[in-house]
Image (spheres, rainbow, N blue to C red):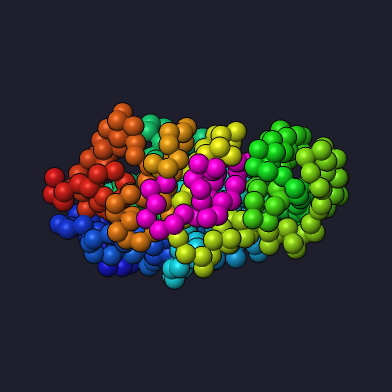
Amino acid sequence: MTPKSEAELSDLLSSADSPLLVQGGGTRGIDLPGDRLSTTDLSGVSLYEPGALTLVAGAGTPLREIEAVLQGEGQRLAFEPMDCRKLLGTNGEPTIGGVVAANQSGPRRIQAGACRDHLLGVRYVDGTGTIIRNGGRVMKNVTGYDLVKLMAGSWGTLGVLTEVALKVLPRADTEETVLIGGCDAQVAVRAMSAALGSPFEVSGAAFDPAADRVLIRIEGFAESVSYRAERLSALLDGFGAIGRSGEAESRQLWADLRDVAQFHDRPGDVWRLSVKPSDAPEIAARLEADGVLYDWGGGLIWALMPEGTDLRTRAGRFNGHATLVRARAQDRARLGMFHPEPEAIAAISAGLRARFDPRGVLNPGLMGRPEPVGA
């Protein structure tokens, strides 16, 4: 099913009596029982005001189309969404609605914030067929419950996005990456913390143990980038061997980090852990993973595990959560994609789903316990 308008989508959902698999471009490898519902025909940029740093587009608009429009005006999506197709072995075309539904945020999140922080407004149709609009086209315009933030990261379980309004930002003139070699994980996290606590406006801080290097990104105008990279190199000199990349190499390094290129074409399950940065080395060591990558200054761990491994059990208790990003269908069903919620949070989540999707037709079972259709 591929509705061509918001009204058609509303009619479809109001009469739905069986589970629906809600998808944008179908690039995230989600496989659930039910009829496929795609938003790809709800496409197109309806408003773009570069001077106001605002863009409005249909949820099914391809991400590449959004990025091309922005690039023409020297602007970008600052939250740096990843392209997950090679990691997950999927096809299709990433859409802006899929990015928002997953709250997809890349390495620049430590500086610019997450996708939800750039979301100004949404239009969506809930599980009863009701068309809902929340937010608008400027910041600080929400009254009542902030459904805009609620929809970001809801993975299509509360409603089907039809339109999103986003804040955009200017593209950086250039960038450079300070490299630190010869670090173990503990030293790497301390180095990243020092860089992020410095006044040099770091926009990326990652550690790749396989390449034995810490990467610290600086972006902006050429003279400023050169000055800040030089000062930051001096600040970090005691942590290991210091090097610096040029612009082209830096862009490729961070594109590879954003898309977790290290795990492309390698067998095994891929997990994503959100942790306290200072806890990251100990947690990563407990995993005994086939590969590890640290982002967000150590706050995000990507882990490659043998197929079927229960990473959450192996990691033990920690402050954070672990998401199963890539796995066989049977392992995803057994382990669950999302980290089990504490009882109080689970009750709130269930209440929200009961309010926005009382019949349980939207991606049932993806987040929390499966809900019977018609409940």
Question: Which residue is depicted at the point 16% across and 48% down?
Answer: 372
Image-quadrant location for residue 171: bottom right
Q: Tell me, yes or no, if residue 81 can be seen here.
A: no
Horizontal side of 213 relative to 110 (left or right) equals right
Horizontal side of 15 relative to 227 (left or right) equals left
Question: Which residue is depicted at the point 82% across and 52% down?
Answer: 243
Q: Tell me, yes or no, if residue 230 can be seen here.
A: yes
x, y percent for residue 314: 42, 42
Q: Is residue 290 magenta?
A: yes
Question: Which residue is depicted at the point 17% across and 58% down?
Answer: 18
Query: Which of the two residues, 226 or 233, is positioned nearer the viewer here?
Result: 233
Query: Which of the two residues, 305 or 298, is positioned nearer the viewer here?
Result: 305
Residue furthest toward the top? 344
Q: Quadrant of the N terminus?
A: bottom left
Q: Is residue 163 above or below residue 236?
A: below
Query: Which of the two residues, 339 or 115, is positioned nearer the viewer here?
Result: 339
Horizontal side of 242 relative to 152 (left or right) equals right
Horizontal side of 343 relative to 228 (left or right) equals left
Q: Is residue 75 above or below residue 108?
A: below
Image-quadrant location for residue 350: top left
x, y percent for residue 315: 45, 40
x, y percent for residue 261: 58, 62
Q: Quadrant of the C terminus?
A: top left
x, y percent for residue 337: 36, 50
Q: Is residue 191 above or below residue 269?
A: above
Q: Is residue 348 above or below residue 133?
A: above
Residue furthest toward the bottom? 91
Q: How many marks?
A: 0
Question: Which residue is depicted at the point 60% across and 47% down?
Answer: 294
Look at the image and give the residue range highlighted in magenta.
Answer: 284-311
Q: Is residue 122 magenta?
A: no
